[in-house]
Image (spheres, rainbow, N blue to C red):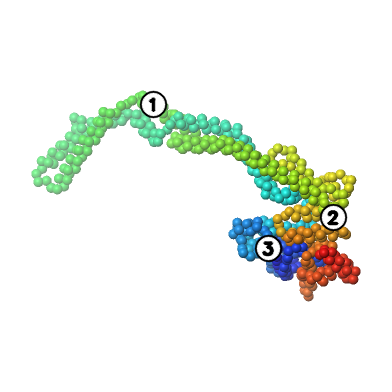
Amino acid sequence: MLVHLSVHNYAIVEHLDLELDRGMSVISGETGAGKSIMLDALGLTLGDRADSGVVRPGADKADILASFDLGDIPEAHTWLAQRDLATEGPCILRRVITAEGRSRGYINGTPCPLGDLKALGELLIDIHSQHEHQSLLKVDTHRRLLDEYAGAQELSRQVNLAAQRWKQTRSELERLASQGDEQRARHQLLSYQLEELENLGLGDNELEQLEQDHKALTNAEGLLAACRQVIEQCSESDAGNVLSALTSSLSRLSGVQGQPGPLNEAANLLASAQIQVEEAVGELNRFLDHFEADPQRQQQLEERLDTIYTLARKHRIHPSELPAMQQQLFDELEGLNADDQATERLSEELAAYGRHYQEKAAELSTRRQKAAAKLSKAVEKEMQLLGMPGGRFSIQLQENTSTDPNGNGLEQVEFLVSANPGQPIKALAKVASGGELSRISLAIQVITAQTSRVPTLVFDEVDVGIGGPTAEVVGQLLRRLGERGQVLTVTHLPQVAAQGHQHLFVHKVRGNNATRTAVSKLSDAQRVEEIARMLGGIDLTEESLAHARKLVSNAQG
């Protein structure tokens, strides 16, 4: 529960420290004194939006801190532990808003996003405002309240998630199906092109070797003539050849007696040249012996090269790039095959999500039907007590016409009401007046709050438009809620204020240059005076004081 609220420089509040107890705490004060300011400040610690306008004029920042005892809230303990934010003492939520409009949130001293403040706050406190009855005109609110009353929030979330996943999966399937004709045509083309390349079977370095062999066969006659001419000049010419000239030269140098060193070196070089020429002639003769000018082989080479070049032109690439093109086509075809596999997988997932949705939605529907009957009866009973004798309340569960999974479940939920005897029961938005709507809203809030796991409930002037004996009933309802946890009630009705376990008085303190809001915890005597003021105005009379004492005595009796 909320044990402490500290507000600094917020709106017209300069400094406020408030200790809060269990039970029903009444908050009252003159109009404009700032009764709702405390709750607005509390809302900021729970993740509400804020701007620089909330900072008290002249201050550089507003600082609000709320401390909670988590003894009865294991869900909050778990939430904090999962995020390494748990502490031994109370849970402290803090919000700081600067005059420039910057905002920072903290949980147990650790900076956090506002979404975390809001998520944790939903486990700690539930605020019912005077305007909340307006949301009762929306069927989404009807569904939410029924699911909360049925304790089916988590099941409702699972149904919504299952429906979302089903729709996402169907959208992906439809996307793949829309590409079907185009993909099938592309798949057929890729398969044909890949088959051509696979049939070509171009090997590593094959193109280079083919071109070399073809070039050799094309130049065969010139090559043979050149080889024979070299052999003739080196060794076979009768008119003189290289080998005979080298032999004669070596013979002449060898016949010189006492030749100097340079001649000796020259003779060695000539001998080496003779050997190399002989080896060259041998290589040429071997080439001529084994070389065959095969026209058939040349034709085969030309046909093979023509096939390769034709396929390369078809793809508008160089022949050497054909292997890379083959791999590229293969990868793309694999991708299309993967899409086919994805379609099959997504179809299976769609069916699985559909089954899961139907299972969870059917379970939710069963719980809604049971809770609807129970909640209708309870709200109808409270309506009788709240000045609507003969009023009827019913919850209609209308099956969805579409067979597709719906995030809201198998049915639409709508509240139906008949405010007066003899009137037909109709949709709430069509038959309830402002005052009736306010009372019906309070009845629903009181009933649903009884099943809430949140220990702290805040009611901000939810009794607007209610008076007389009905106001006392409202006070009794709120006191009853306070006996099971903690209730904070902002009210202007003395019948409601008298039911509180403690009373907080909000008032303005005027200084020389500024006005600020202060809150006092009233003693028993002060409380009687405040209720008397609420009954009869500023001037207290013995009659109003006596009436106030009687209201307090009856509430505590």
**In this orientation, which residue lies closer to the viewer: 121 or 202?**
121
**Disc on res. 68:** 3
Where is residue 73, by image quadrant?
A: bottom right
Above/below status of 490 relative to 191:
below
Residue topped by disc 2: 386
Give the SS element for disc 1.
helix
The residue depicted at 73 percent of the width and 57 percent of the height is 126
Above/below status of 386 relative to 369:
below
Give the SS element for disc 2.
loop
Type of amino acid at the residue the image marks with label 3: Phe
**Which label's residue is closer to the chain start, 2 or 1?**
1
Type of amino acid at the residue the image marks with label 2: Leu
**Which label's residue is closer to the chain start, 1 or 3?**
3
Locate the C terminus and report the quarter of the image it occupies.
Answer: bottom right
Q: Where in the figure is residue 100, as x and y percent of width and height?
A: 68, 64
Q: Where in the figure is residue 502, as x and y percent of width and height?
A: 77, 66
* Real-space CA distance between mark 1 and mark 3, rounded to the nearest whole angstrom: 92 Å
- Label 2 crowd (10 A; few <14 / some 14-19 / many >=20): many
Where is residue 520, by image quadrant?
A: bottom right
Residue topped by disc 1: 300
